[in-house]
Amino acid sequence: MSQDTLASRTNTSLSTLGDVKKTSSRKGLAFWMAFIAVLASLFLSVLDLCAVPTALPTIVADLQGGDQYIWVGSAYALSSTAVLLLCGRMADIFGRRPVMLTSITIFALGSALAGASQSMSMLVAARVVQGLGGGCIYAMTQIITSDLVPLAERAAYQSALVMVYALAAGIGPFIGAVFSEKASWRWLFYLNLPLTGLAFALVAIFLRVNTPGGAVLTKLSRMDWIGNGLIAAGSSLTLIGLVWGGVHYPWNSAHVLGPLISGVVLMAAFFFYEYMLFGRSTSEGKTGNNTSSATLPFVATFLHGFVSIAIIYYMPVFFQACMGASAIRSSVDTLPISVVMTPFAMFCGITIKVTQKYRPMNYLGWTLSAVGVGLLTLLRPDSSTAKWAGFQFIAAAGTGINYASTLFPILAPLPVARNAAAVAFFAFCRSFAQTWGIAMAGVILQNRLSSTLPAAFVSLFPGDVDLAFAAVPVIRTLDESLRAEVQLAFADSLSIVWKVMIGVCGAGFLTVLLLKEVPMTTHMDERFALEKGEKIADEEKGQVATA
């Protein structure tokens, strides 16, 4: 780490006092246009992420790359996760606006390459480029929102981010299905080009925030290249092991254990390097001497990402395997998840803003999540619509609340000057947890299916195949008696997944018990606030409105 990092430890409190300012809750046109630019950028990245899986079968068939299908999604997840912490530090050194504009440009480049791909290898490479841009876009939306709004007022705006995320996640699968079936899957990626153009224009015109000065080489010398290199390499290797495990290679093979062990070692080295050698991390995991108060919210964020992705990823498996739904029909049946998350995230935001307390909402979120996934264990192939819709409603209500609530205990103990790095690590924890959630739930499901599926059905597949997904398209072709046995086996196996998620929710609840309620600051980091002219204009409009 550079000398800048060491110096910042001694100067943080002084610089923070000079760089923060108590702000009014009144917002003007410049603020709202800047916030709309942020929301448009978030919508862009989430829409692509959620639309591609629906179109994946068509893409694989067209490019004849069935052996590489898993990398179309995994390449994006890998690169977007690896770049998150680097993005946070770059935002501090180079400024929010240049990093956001660069991220949108990289995402557009990846989209153009993906649409023009003539092979699966080219598409996977394009998805890596897309992930670099998309990961930074996601992190920057959180960071810029933290700059524009003080923590005491941020709950409502955090809810708006969740609303846009849920909207994009809700319509993404339909857009993917329409383009793949009615037009061409290539337009799924080409659609991003006008959207990136719009997002770029909004950010360039309206996101007029302060940008640090200085020479480029000087700024580059301030980057924590060793720390970011360790976490990028460690997370990438870990994700590769998780992606390969149970799909390309057995979990106990060297191809899986090698990357997993190497990744864990490198990530441990990252934390040792950052925490022990320098006392201040890229993740901002320490605040004063109260390490637990700083660490527990990140643990809760990881646990929430683990549970939420398991619900989103494996509820469609239930509908397709146990109820015979098509891919498109299953996306309709899981609409309660995306529809319910938004109002409960908004409820959470309003409640936190009014009460100025975040622990009660975290308690409620984990409680509803635990009850919701507990009820999911009761689902069977003959469950009524009221049951599967109602159970999803409760689980989605809990995860929706926690989508909006988990950031506040992270930022409340921190000086505002450390927001960017903390928010970037928050995004990293959630993204990294989602890959773990998909993989670990898949392992549980696969192991249970191996012992519960009828032998007559298992004999239809090679011994090393991942039954959790490979078996689903075959179920509808079976005779009625065998199909009923297989559907019941899937329902039983998925119930084990949900039981494990109850324990994860319990661990999340425990993290809140161990937290202290810290007053939320009413100040912002003036280094990255709206430019002076924009702020004056907003304040004048606010005074006129008051008069």
Image (spheres, helix red, strand yellow):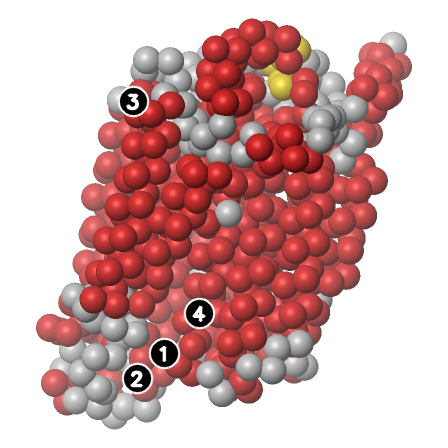
Give the structural element (helix, strand or loop) at label 4. Answer: helix
Which residue is at a point 50% across and 60% down the rendered structure image? 76
Establish if 288 lies above or below 61. above
Establish if 496 lies above or below 346. below
Q: Is residue 347 left or right of residue 30?
A: left
Q: Position of residue 372 (x, y in %)?
A: 32, 47
Which tag is nearer the camera, tag 3 or tag 2? Answer: 3
Dot 4, how many residues are within 10 Å of its Cα: few (below 14), some (14-19), or many (20+)?
many
Q: Which image quadrant is residue 259 in?
A: bottom left
Q: Which residue is mark 4?
A: 71
Give the structural element (helix, strand or loop) at label 1. Answer: loop
Amino acid type for the residue under numbered disc 3 = Ser
Q: Which residue is mark 1?
A: 324
Q: Position of residue 528 (x, y in %)?
A: 68, 25
Cα separation, mark 1 vs mark 3, equals: 47 Å
Nearer the N terminus, badge 3 or badge 2?
A: 3
Which tag is nearer the camera, tag 1 or tag 4? Answer: 4
Give the structural element (helix, strand or loop) at label 3. Answer: helix
Amino acid type for the residue under numbered disc 1 = Gly
Nearer the N terminus, badge 2 or badge 4?
A: 4
Q: Which residue is mark 3?
A: 292
Cα separation, mark 2 vs mark 4, equals: 25 Å
Cα separation, mark 3 vs mark 4, equals: 37 Å
Amino acid type for the residue under numbered disc 4 = Trp
Q: Nearer the viewer, residue 103 or 514?
A: 103
Establish if 522 lies above or below 328. above
Q: Nearer the viewer, residue 350 or 132?
A: 132
Give the structural element (helix, strand or loop) at label 2. Answer: helix
